[in-house]
Image (tube, coloured by chain):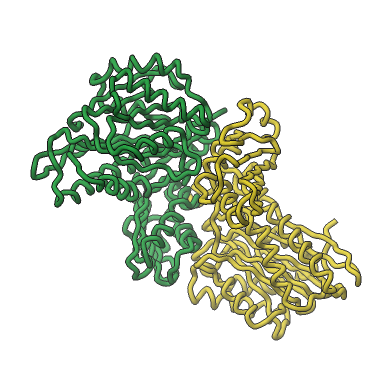
Chain colours: A yellow, B green
């Protein structure tokens, strides 16, 4: 059963921004101002909603909610785009009677197009009518672009003062452009959280989840993750319980991140790349990313080919320091490369059943260092090329 | 007409190492020891022929030729592979009566397999019979793996003391594994070259040619480029002519590099990415590589889609420093993005005829810095995925 944290209401509407006959505008509204944390794209080109949300969070640590649309990214739209973003927020604040409270904007969709504000003027009052009538699944559906399924994750945690509930949403399936924005992630929680550790907790959670996945290595102008904690459960988080909250936030983010890779454009596999024995975490990450981005590794796994050579060649060019003779590569727990040479020449037959699975685990041990890193990647298929080559024609 | 430098003979034979009914073993032999330069793969996993060639060139600055086979890479083959490589060289030296002179080995093909020396024992005497009977085109064909056409380039240069001739060979079409080795390049020249500048000249030429192309971003265990100058023309290069020789070497390498991209696995386009106005060359290269490796840019160009958004998003995540408002992007000389926004919304119609061509030029101006870089890339097609996913099945 889907768990919903206390004190949040949802609204969705078909605003016809780009899609017809489906919801494309959603509001997540907290009854009271919620403590907010955010992580934004590092892309140099930042969409208007990213710039506006940053500005809001510079001034305030609490907001009332999140306004999100699909279909138009409001990126590369200059000053007009920025002003349009602010105006849509004003509309919502006026119609929903939010007074001085702020809401965070997020957009995903075609870049370079301006919002048509008349559509928003019509849609926002309709949005209000659905407040409290819409469930979270519809919100998750309303923010989809090329996603093939809505992405949700939830969890209940028992603290000394009572139970608190987490609910996360995500959208993402590879960075497709003009439906450019890769991913959005929102996590709601009804715990009462005091102090600034909520922001650090989100940063850590994102580092170990959304920042540790790759579909095609591209990032977007609109990526952002928001986490809200409104305290509506009445349950205050004690200091010795902060780690439990951090862990929960991380596991929600990891679950959502997994779903994004699972829904990768054209993808048929979730590749778990686990690197150990590196000199440090940075080196482990370098190796994991080089393997995870290698087109040859990605196409091999699509072809269910236990191609250790491509993995080894990718790590050889990763730039990480290691002794090639100490490298060990395992697929599905089976050692296929060690001491500079392939271990088992009948690997094709042994591996066949493991490579049919959706989840494929690649473990690379570089030596005796302490650095490790785990990355989720997808395979590369003809369908990915078709989606991305033919999208606009 | 194909120009052949003086004093080189060619031999090719079908040794049946992996391919049947086609030449797969070739020898390039200079009548006299030729000054040799080499550039090797930076991959941490290095094939036996790479290790052996390095060792030879540590001791000697002149060699008699190049022995190259296709079908087996002799990579990840341990000490046996190293010893096998040395033994094949010994066979050739014995059969061809080379005495103390050395030849450089190069291999391309399946990795992890050991040479069957009996095949070599049979093939090398046959190879000798063809010496002088084979033309360079057959050498270029003998080193092909997934290449669809042989790659040659030649040039004559007039110096004060007479004419000299350059002839280059290359193989490469994306790093395919088990046919793992991406590229080999050999340049022969009959000028008399004294001093060590020949090595630096090759390094520079490779940096601006083979190191400035990308098909899939993967490098191999077997990549190498050899350049020989045997002086057989009797033409000595004067000091003030060295630059002309450097330029010629560079242009031969660039022509061969272009052909590799032209023959990219599944590719339909050669994408010329020219970045200017960066703070320095390193930053320009960073941007060019990020764009050139972007799957979204590569699929868009395959789809003949003037997708400035993907180019802009790639450069935004490249890590280079620039002011987004100063960025200008041109495709086929037409400005499509400037001052943070798309310039022309009817770009699809305007660009259609340019994007049908094989060669597509993307120019990115980042600002007013002096750094620039040019990279050749290929597009990404369903055929690439098919080739690389289905290769072993």
* A195 vs A306: above or below: below
Residue at image point 24% right, 19% down: B133
* B36 vs A42: above or below: above
Side (left or right) of B33 relative to A257: left
Residue at image point 49% right, 47% down: A389
Which of the image's four quarters has the N terminus of chain B? top left
* A227 vs B114: above or below: below
In the rendered image, which quarter is residue A347 located in?
Answer: top right
**Residue lying at the far bottom of the rendered structure:** A100
In the rendered image, which quarter is residue A343 located in?
Answer: top right
Number of marks: 0
Q: Position of residue B144 (x, y in %)?
A: 38, 29
Tell me, yes or no, if residue A390 can be seen here.
no
* Along the viewing direction, whichever of B53 and A282 lies nearer the viewer: B53
Q: Position of residue B276 (x, y in %)?
A: 34, 63
Residue at image point 78% right, 70% down: A9
Q: Position of residue A236 (x, y in %)?
A: 85, 75
* Along the viewing direction, whichever of B266 and A307 lies nearer the viewer: A307
Which of the image's four quarters has the C terminus of chain B? top right
Side (left or right) of B218 relative to A7: left
Q: Position of residue A316 (x, y in %)?
A: 52, 44
Tell me, yes or no, if residue B372 can be seen here.
yes
């Amino acid at each position: 059963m889907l768990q919903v944290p206390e004190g949040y209401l949802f609204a969705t509407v078909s605003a016809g921004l780009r899609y017809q006959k489906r919801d494309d505008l959603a509001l997540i509204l907290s009854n009271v101002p919620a403590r907010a944390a955010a992580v934004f794209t590092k892309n140099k080109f930042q969409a208007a909603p990213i710039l506006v949300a940053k500005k809001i969070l510079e001034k305030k640590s609490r907001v009332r909610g999140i306004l999100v649309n699909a279909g138009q990214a409001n990126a590369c739209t200059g000053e007009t785009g920025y002003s349009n973003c602010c105006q849509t927020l004003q509309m919502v604040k006026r119609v929903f009677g939010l007074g001085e409270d702020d809401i965070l904007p997020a957009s995903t969709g075609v870049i370079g197009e301006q919002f048509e504000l008349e559509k928003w003027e019509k849609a926002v009052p309709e949005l209000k009518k659905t407040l409290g009538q819409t469930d979270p699944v519809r919100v998750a559906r309303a923010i989809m672009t090329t996603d093939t399924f809505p992405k949700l994750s939830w969890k209940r945690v028992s603290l000394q003062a009572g139970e608190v509930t987490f609910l996360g949403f995500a959208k993402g399936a590879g960075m497709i452009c003009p439906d450019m924005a890769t991913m959005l992630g929102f996590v709601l929680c009804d715990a009462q959280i005091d102090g600034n550790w909520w922001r650090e907790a989100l940063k850590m959670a994102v580092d170990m989840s959304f920042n540790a996945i790759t579909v095609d290595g591209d990032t977007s102008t609109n990526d952002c993750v928001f986490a809200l904690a409104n305290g509506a459960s009445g349950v205050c988080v004690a200091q010795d319980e902060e780690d439990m909250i951090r862990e929960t936030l991380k596991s929600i983010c990891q679950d959502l991140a997994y779903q994004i890779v699972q829904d990768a454009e054209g993808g048929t596999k979730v590749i778990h790349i686990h690197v150990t024995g590196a000199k440090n975490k940075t080196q482990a990450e370098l190796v994991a990313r080089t393997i995870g981005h290698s087109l040859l590794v990605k196409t091999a796994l699509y072809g269910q080919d236990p191609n250790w050579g491509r993995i080894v060649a990718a790590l050889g060019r990763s730039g990480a320091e290691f002794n090639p003779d100490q490298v060990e590569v395992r697929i599905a727990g089976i050692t296929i490369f060690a001491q500079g040479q392939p271990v088992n020449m009948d690997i094709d037959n042994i591996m066949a059943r493991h490579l049919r699975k959706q989840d494929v685990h690649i473990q690379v041990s570089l030596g005796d260092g302490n650095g490790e890193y785990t990355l989720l990647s997808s395979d590369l298929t003809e369908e990915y090329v078709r989606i991305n080559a033919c999208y606009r024609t």
